[in-house]
Image (cartoon, coloured by chain):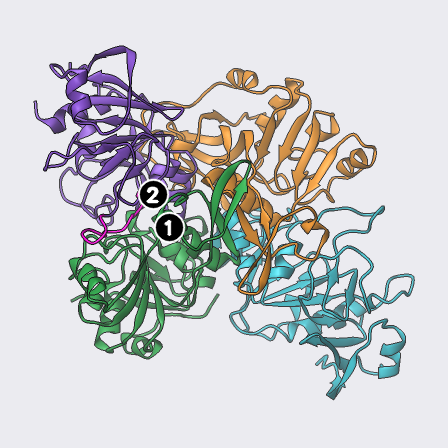
Chain colours: A green, B orange, C purple, D cyan
Amino acid sequence: MALDKQVDWSDVGPLFRDGISVMFGGFMGVGTPDGLVSVLRERGTKNLTLIGNDTAAPETGVGPLISDGHVSKVVVSHIGTNPVTGKKMIAGELDVDLVPQGTLAERIRCGGAGLGGVLTPTGVGTVVEEGKAKMVVDGKTFLVELPLRADVAILKAKRADRAGNLVYERAARNFNPIMALAADLVIAEVDEIVEIGEIDPDHVMTPAALVDKIVLTRRL
Amino acid sequence: MALDKQVDWSDVGPLFRDGISVMFGGFMGVGTPDGLVSVLRERGTKNLTLIGNDTAAPETGVGPLISDGHVSKVVVSHIGTNPVTGKKMIAGELDVDLVPQGTLAERIRCGGAGLGGVLTPTGVGTVVEEGKAKMVVDGKTFLVELPLRADVAILKAKRADRAGNLVYERAARNFNPIMALAADLVIAEVDEIVEIGEIDPDHVMTPAALVDKIVLTRRL
Amino acid sequence: MQAKEVIARRVAQEFHEGYVVNLGIGLPTLVPRYLPAGMHITLQSENGFLGLAPLEGEPLPGVVNAGGQPCGLMPGAAMFDSAMSFALIRGGHVDVTVLGGLQVDEEGNLANWMVPGKMVPGMGGAMDLVTGARKVIVAMEHCTKEGEPRILDRCTLPLTAKGRVAMVVTELAVFRITHGEFVLIEHAPGVSVEDVRARTKARFAVSDELKAINLG
Amino acid sequence: MQAKEVIARRVAQEFHEGYVVNLGIGLPTLVPRYLPAGMHITLQSENGFLGLAPLEGEPLPGVVNAGGQPCGLMPGAAMFDSAMSFALIRGGHVDVTVLGGLQVDEEGNLANWMVPGKMVPGMGGAMDLVTGARKVIVAMEHCTKEGEPRILDRCTLPLTAKGRVAMVVTELAVFRITHGEFVLIEHAPGVSVEDVRARTKARFAVSDELKAINLG
């Protein structure tokens, strides 16, 4: 618990490699770690697979990574707010895997919780069911949806203690807590770092044990 | 949001009937609503099915309900701390369904989250797998575990606002939040009731929308 | 009265005190304006909270709706993560969802998330909402801009969910769908059953209690 | 040195800085006493938290371990619900779990939750812990009170989990189980391989690097 997980921005770049899968917190960019997204750009990473709720807009959230060609695949629930994503998809430059939002949340949670999948009614009778196993429980049909994991999760929190306990602010929480469970390396960009013991244990939203590195938001 | 969900203790009794299934928060009695348990006793309810982590001890948590013969079945992960449970089981007076604790949590969560089940590795190759469907995902075998719901959930929280937003204290949280999702009627016994707006939205652990009734802990 | 107002006013009549409601973007967001004074509902948002309110004053950090737009918080609001948000949605804890539609058919199927070759925005939370909300109301204009019926015998666009629509409200008519039966229950003032039939490509029964939409 | 202390001292050597550890009741709870000074580990508890500490002063409301006994909280502790607690356990976020055992067999199977007809306490969180923790260490006395071996070719009691035990530490010996092979890697001072064989009913290989347990 006494490990200080804070790193400098210069330490972050080497954690990213070409071809990695990256889960990113955020919903329309709210709760997305802009500084970590910038590092992925500045480092010139290629062939990233992004996993998250949406591709925001061309200039917000993970949008710039897509605009600048760092990404080969996205696994998201929504791309409609970012026309660049659609264009690249149609041009065959970007593989887009659309997943219902609640199913995306459960698949990530499964990946992080050691579960082999969940049975969800969402998508039954739609194109979402294609290629998936179905099970009937109590006369109702469910799709078997499988776990998702990533090499790296990049999170945004309001506050961390030095051990890595995280607190999110309002609706910026969204996918961040479940992604903290589901990646081999978890990096959180936080607006404030406090001493260990300053966050009430009941207010911790992501326990330090899940977080590998914390970095203080760059003020531009 | 303006509905005041506080009720008097005299209003609680009529909510319980013979033969109902009752999810109870708590772990070794910590986080169990003792006042609501007392009402179930005083009312003389019969043939209850109790769903929760454990049967605590003869005189703590839900223990007295078992000692006094109100219960015909328990679905729990552990009965070892309450010898009365074991005796009644052996005597054929009590049906005991033992479920691994993590599986119990997931089954309750499924019941509350509209999921048809989860795939868990827990119990594969043990007696727990008997009678259950299995699925192989990526070469690994999982059990398909099905949802659990109850007629009533009885919860214990530290604080509520009048709308029913709940905050739990320390390890008294345990099963309470997921049970709030999984019962037709959700009743919380709380140590303190505050005005709506007094709990920071980021600190709410169970949203008011899940809670039907709140009752202030009886000081004996 | 504009089509949108007619629709929003009518949908508002389906809300009841204490309801938890999730509103799709666009037209559905107009509905709360037409609630009776003193009725309290709680708005749920996919991005993780209960208790949305209109924005008042400066935007607050992280307080945004599912479209990413700044909004307010009702007293008694609660925030949570996406897994919990969809546990609420899928688990039947949302009393009503109101969504726009591209097509609805006789079987209560809804298509509202893509037009192959044209528009592939993704389903976002719509599939979960339509699958999990206790009551699904589709609020849409009766025909497309080109005058093509949106209410069909069979949806031709990819479905959002099968057999989940309980009610369709347009500027012309209100349909209830129960036990696989499509029933016209109300018509806009001055609109006849024949008018509705002419613009509807689905079989429907006419309720014995057919009446004009109350736009009081 | 008592058997329990030998076992606890040896298990402590498997912990590393920063580890998240879940300890079963009884003997395993002795292990932290024998950690090197300055080594920090985080104890996880099934009832919903990370950062257990020994009780100091008055018990605090809700601060109890998985046995329901009052405990303390480390600075930096975090509390959560049972679903999250087992997401951590099952999802491989617990580096080591140390549990007592009734029987362990050659295939790394563990039986520690019931004795049919005698003791049926329930598995509690043990099945999830043994299934999900990154490393499962069984810490137990080598034989039963009646002198019967607990390490067998095949468990006869109902299993807790199949093939998940990575290490068995007793007062006589330390076994590593990798790739389905049971290997004796250490023996207690003054205990010979033959002594171990005589009290062990499982086939095991002897490591080329066999050495005495360091009880420093």
Residue type highlighted by circle 2: Met
> Which residue in the rendered view is the most extreme toward the bottom?
D208
Dot 2: chain letter? C
Q: Which residues, given as a range, are shown in magenta?
A: C115-127
Horizontally, residue C79 falls left or right of residue C35, namely right
Q: Quadrant of residue A15?
A: bottom left
Rendered location of residue B123, percent (x, y)? 66, 54
Mark sitting on residue A128? 1
* Residue, far top: C209
Q: Are marks 2 and 1 in contact (CB under 8 Å)?
A: yes
Q: Which residue is mark 2?
A: C127
Residue at position x 29%, y 48% in the image: C124
Residue drawn at the location 55% of the way across and 36% of the way down: A138
Q: Which residue occupies the extreme left position in the image?
A: C1
Would you call the spot at circle 2 few (<14 residues within 10 Å), some (14-19), or many (20 or more)? many
Q: Is residue A26 magenta?
A: no
* Label 1: chain letter: A
Callout 1, which amino acid? Val
Q: Quadrant of the N terminus of chain D?
A: bottom right
Magenta: main secondary structure equals loop
Q: Position of residue A112 (x, y in %)?
A: 47, 59
